[in-house]
Amino acid sequence: MASGHGGRLATAAAARLCLGGCRTSHAGAGLSLKREYDAIVIGAGHNGLVAAAYLQKGGLKTAVLERRHLVGGAAVTEEIIPGFRFSRASYLLSLLRPQIYTELELKKYGLKVLPRDPYSFTPMLDDGQHGRRPFSLLLGNNMAETQNQIAQFSVKDAQAFPKYEAFMSHLVSAIDPLLDTCPVDMALFSQGSLLQRLKALRSLQVLFRAGFALGKHLPQYYQVLTAPISKILDLWFESEPLKATLATDAVIGAMAGPHTPGSGYVLLHHVMGELEGRQGAWGYVAGGMGELSQALAHAAIVLGAEIFTEKTVAHILLSSDGQVQGVALQDGTEVKSRLVLSNASPQVTFLELTPQEQLPLEFVQRISQFDTCSPVTKVNVAVDRLPNFLAAPNTSDGHPLPHHQCSIHLNCEDMHLLHQAFEDACHGRPSGRPMIEMCIPSVLDPTLAPPGCHVVSLFTQYTPYTLAEGKQWDSHERDGYADQVFDCIEAYAPGFKASVIGRDVLTPPDLEQIFGLPGGNIFHGAMSLDQLYFARPVPSYSSYRSPVQGLYLCGSGAHPGGGVMGAAGRNAAQTALEDFKKL
C-alpha cells in the first residue's frame, strides 16, 4: 500500500536527487525492483506515468517498467546532435487534461509551457504578380488582426471566421466531459446484473448532457463528426489557403485525406485542448516534451511510485483460471501484482504480451484488425540560422519574427495539394509535395540550441509504412525522402538547405521500432469513427478493462485516443482502483 508520511518525505528527496541529476536517465535510480507490488504499469509513456501517479495516490503500491533508457515514451527530449535538444517525437502540448495539471501539481514539479501567439503561418510560393513578394496567412489570438489576414484572400471568410470559431468552441465544450469518463459498457445492458444495468444506464447521462448542450444544432454538429473536412470547410469558407490551413488539423497523424469521411472528428480532437485557459491553444514545453514526462515522473515518485527503465516486459503472468498475477521480464525476473495496466498498444498488449489461449478468439481477431496505418515521417533538424521565407523575409539582425514561433504549414496553399499528397501515399509512394508542419521551438526556448542556432521539427506526411511493391524503407529511401522535404522547404525559404547542421529522420517503421508506436501511428491506432468511444480498441472492451481479470489498457489505444492528453491513463487508473476495492 502507499507509504506513510515519513516514507513520502524520503521518496521526495530521492526524486529530487534522481530527477535533478539524471534528467535524461531513469527515474528509478537507486531503487531495487521488488518482487511484488499491488499494481504494475507497463511502459513509462505519459499515460503510463499518469496512471502510476493516480494508482499510487489511490493507495496502491505501484511500479512502472519501461524498456527504454528514459521515461516519456513519445514525449521525450533527446540530444541527438551535440548541443541540440529535440522533442524527438511529440513536439507540442495542448491536450493534457486540466485536472492532471492541478491534481498532480505539475507546475510544482517544473512543468512550464510557452504559449504561441500568433500560432499558425502559411506562406504561399507565388501570388501571380511579378515584383511582389508572395502572400502569406498568419493566424493569432487577436481576432481583428486574424480577420485582416484572412481578408487578403476573402472578405466573406474574414467575416465568417469568428462564427466558425464559436461554432467549434460550442461543440468542444459539449463533448469535453466525455474525455474524462469511462465509455458506457453496452454489454452490461444485456449481460450484466440488475445493479450493473442500472449503473450503465446512469453512465449514459454524460452522453445525454452532451446532446442537450448541442440542442437544435445537433444535426450540424453530427455532420462535423462524420463528414469529410473538405465538406465542412466548404460550408463556411471559400478561400483555399484558409481551408487548407484549417484542414491540416483534420488529417495530421491520420492516413486520411481532406475528402475522407470522418476527418472532421480528427480536427475536433486537435482543438479540444487548452493552454493557460485559452481553448484550442498549443504551446512548447520549456526544455522540450521530456520535461512534461519528468514532471509526471516526479509527481508519481513523490507519491511513492517506483519507476524503472531498461526493464523490458516479456509477457504478462496469468493464473490457471485466467487472472493477472504479474509480469515476467526479458531477463527472466518475475514480478507479482494483482493489477497490470499496459501503456503499450493494444496489439503489443494482447497479441505479444498476453498468452493467446487466455483470450477469446473473437477478441484476438478484432485486435489484430485494429487499424494502425500511419502516414507520418518526423524529421528533426539542427540549423545554424532561422529559415528566411520569401513571403516574410527576415530582418538584417536575424532575430526571430512572430511567424517563426508558429506551426508553419508548407505545401498547404489549397486542398488539392493535400489531397494529392494523400493519393501518392495510397499508391505506396511518399508524397511528391508532402504536407509539412514546421515548428521552431528554440525561438521561444533558446536553451534547446547553441547561440544563434535552432532546432527545427518537421512533421511530414504522407509516407506509407510499406512502399510500393512491398519495398521496405532503407537508408537510401529515408535520405531520399528527407532530401525531397528539404527541397520543398528551400522553395519557400531559400538558403534552408545550406543552414542544416544535422538531421534525424524517423519514418513509420522507425517510429514503431524506437517508440513502440504500432505502424508508426502516433495515436496507437486510427482515430476513425469505427475506432472511437464504444469501439476503442474493440466493442465491449472500451472501458479500459480486458477479457483478463486484472489487466487494463491505459494508453492511447484506449478511449479517448491519442495525443499528449493523459486522459486514458487517469481514467484507466480510476477504473482499476474501483475494481481493486472489490477484490
Image: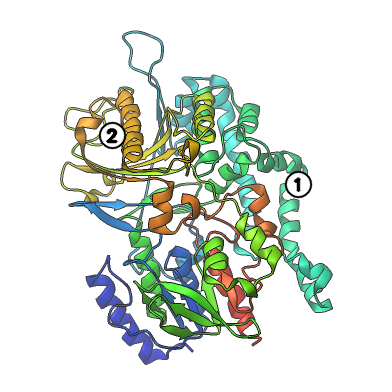
Residue designated by label 2: 401
Q: Residue at x 52, y 64 (%)?
A: 348
**Mark 1 neighbour class, 10 Å CA radius: few under 14, some 14 to 19, many 20 or more:** few
Image coordinates of residue 438 in percent, x first then y, are 36, 38
Q: Is there any visible trace of residue 424 in the rendered image?
A: yes
Question: In the image shown, does 522 or 414 lie closer to the viewer?
Answer: 522
x then y, percent, for residue 94: 46, 52
Q: In the drawing, what numbered circle is on residue 84? A: none
- The answer to which quarter of the image holds residue 339 is bottom right
Q: Earlier in the sequence, mark 1 or mark 2?
A: 1
Kind of residue sitting beneath label 2: Leu
Identified at 50% across, 41% down, the residue is 252
Give the CA distance from mark 1 to mark 2: 43 Å
Q: SS for tag 1? A: helix
Q: Are marks 1 and 2 in contact (CB under 8 Å)?
A: no
**Figure check: 541 above or below 427:** below
In the picture, the quarter occupied by the C terminus is bottom right
Q: Position of residue 239 (x, y in %)?
A: 54, 22
Q: Nearer the viewer, residue 517 or 307?
A: 517
Q: Which residue is mark 1?
A: 215
**Image point (64%, 35%), residue name:** 228
In the shown orientation, is residue 453 left or right of residue 297? left
